[in-house]
Image (cartoon, rainbow, N blue to C red):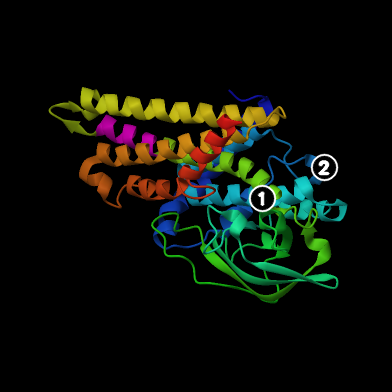
Amino acid sequence: MLPTPEAEDLIDLTRQIVKAELAPRAAEAEAEEKFPREVFRILGRAGLLGLPYPEEVGGGGQPYEVYLQVLEEIAAAWASVAVGMSVHTLACYPVATYGDEEQRERLPELLGGELLGGYALSEPHAGSDAAALSTRAVRDGDHYVITGTKAWITHGGEADFYVLFARTSDDGGRGISAFLIDGRMDGLSFGPPERKMGLTGSTTAQLLFDGARVPVERRIGAEGQGFPIALSALDSGRLGIAACAVGLAQGALDEAVAYARQREQFGRPIIEHQGLGFLLADMAAAVESARATYLEAARRRDRGLPFGRQASIAKLVATDVAMKVTTDAVQVLGGYGYTRDFPVERYMREAKVMQIFEGTNQIQRLVIARHLAR
């Protein structure tokens, strides 16, 4: 149930774009490991890259529950693009929420659709333990000099801007600051794209900083405020990944049902055999349950209520569901499901990483347990 007629029109527009622009390109771009930059421009020009931000700063003025359902529609056809859209939204969050007046004046440019953002938190030896990051930002007059390596960065080498988290003191999590940096600045280079199991249309690469100079006015928030900014952003980002996971699972379910309706064994469609019918029923129940979980968390966010625990639950539940449903979809298609003639094998490969990024599901369990202990 969508909250407004405007939201219903937005979902209809998204479905039209998905059908005309995304679905026909997805399989080939993934097979060729080709980053679909033009697709993001299409989404941007349609106003879809800034949906949960206020209209006065160039956003779409939509509640989070609507934005997430748009993400789900996109993920059902092309997970790489949906994840990229989620990461872009995540990259805009620190500026929108913690930026000063001058930085917020850049939001219409960041949200306008022509630029694409990245989120530079993880490092080769600081993934789940983000407070252990070692990339340095040393104050030098009216600049910070950045040295270090960021790893596993979605849109690495492709983004027009990044939100970077770097260490400005040795005071653990309290020694990290956030910066808005240009994607083509001096002193910034990129490692080769990672050779991944899935999401091959989404470029993931290291960011290599060698004395890159960032003006002080590009620091977001106070010096040392970066870690809480990062954690706050990730609460919302986890909801984006949950929606992407549900979309991926829905796409796999749709493929499995369509196949089971037309494939006949023993004189009737295999969906009419109880063994397959019950499997598909369980898949459908799992998808619906995961969708309800992320929507409840989003509605709490929209009402201004605490939602961190619910975001972790949604990310955990939805991504585990995506892994199971895509695996079961391959099983429904049998030998055909194991071939690249059908998309379910790709969906299964793409589902795995959703249990890993934006906080592994083991970390989500840790977050949930800590909330329960308070």
Q: Which mark is residue 368?
A: none
The amino acid type, in three-letter code, at marker 2 is: Glu
Q: Nearer the viewer, residue 117 or 136?
A: 136
Quarter of the rendering occupied by the C terminus? top right
Image vertical order of residue 298 relative to residue 342, above or below: above
Q: Quadrant of residue 110?
A: bottom right
- Rendered location of residue 111, percent (x, y): 72, 50
Q: Is residue 280 left or right of residue 196?
A: left
Q: Nearer the viewer, residue 276 or 15?
A: 276
Which residue does the image show at 73% across and 60% down from the upper left? 179
Image vertical order of residue 277 relative to residue 172, above or below: above
Q: Total label count?
A: 2
* Magenta stretch prevailing secondary structure: helix
Is disc 2 placed on a helix, strand or loop? helix
The answer to whether residue 255 is magenta is yes
User: Start and end of the magenta stretch?
Assistant: 252-262
Which residue does the image show at 68% across and 71% down from the upper left? 184
According to the picture, the residue beneath numbered tag 1 turns out to be 230
The answer to whether residue 34 is magenta is no
| Discs 1/2, front | 1
According to the picture, the residue beneath numbered tag 2 turns out to be 56
The amino acid type, in three-letter code, at marker 1 is: Ala
- Rendered location of residue 108, percent (x, y): 78, 51
Which residue does the image show at 32% across and 28% down from the upper left? 280
**Residue 81 can be seen in this image:** yes
Q: Quadrant of residue 1?
A: top right
Is disc 1 placed on a helix, strand or loop? helix
